[in-house]
Image: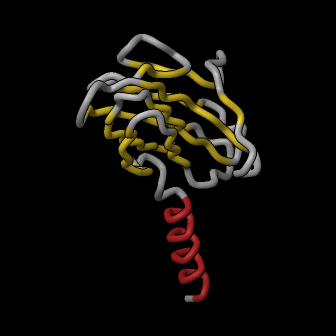
Amino acid sequence: MKKFLFIVVFAVAAMAATAQKGVVVELDVDTLNGAETVYFETPIFTGSDAFTLQAACDNIGGTSEGTLSLEASVDGSDWVPLAEQAGLIHGFATTGENDSLTITDNANISWIIQKNSFLQYRVKGTGAASDSTLITVKYVRK
């Protein structure tokens, strides 16, 4: 009976450890107003699992302008900009760009991180003077 109980507990623990894979998680929704900067940080990732970050822009007033870009950190306090890198990071944007997204109404970008080399990631949104855009950021681990 003890062996059976151990097997059941082990199986449940193994399923719980992978429960977040394949689940879309919304990081945050924020409004980019004017020439401000907003950040959308992921939780701390352990392991080297691949994941995808996606950002969507919706105009809510004025003209949607600005840029969304991807940054990474090994300690959660010092951030570096990330650019497309073969085999590691690839971006797909409705505007045809790879590394960043020029914000327009209904613009979207997805970054596929094929090899997680950092502890944490964030999407940086920088607006323009007449900008008022709702930005939604989500991710999914693979």
Tell me which residue sits at (38%, 24%) in the image: 65
Q: Residue at x 38, y 39 (%)?
A: 33
Count how many numbered circles sit on residues in the image: 0
| Foreground pick, 134 / 136 | 134
> With respect to residue 136, does 9 lie above or below?
below
- Residue found at the very far top of the displayed protein: 96
Q: Outermost residue toward the bottom?
A: 1
Picture residue at 57% right of the left edge, 54% below the top: 43
Q: How is the image coloured?
A: secondary structure
Task: Answer above or below: position of 84 versus 44.
Answer: above
Instruction: Residue 81: name its quadrant.
Output: top right
Place of residue 7 in the rendered image (x, y in percent of width and height, measured from the top left): 57, 74
Q: Is residue 75 left or right of residue 41?
A: right
Look at 45% across and 43% down and name the residue there: 139
83 left or right of 38 in image: right
Query: In the displayed image of the protein, which residue is found farthest to the front?
Result: 129
| Front position in the image: 99 or 6 | 99
Q: Nearer the viewer, residue 41 or 105?
A: 105
Image quadrant holding the N terminus, namely bottom right
- The correct choice, above or below, for 26 with respect to 51 in the image is below
Position in image of residue 46 (x %, y %): 67, 52
Q: Residue 86 location, x and y as percent?
A: 65, 15
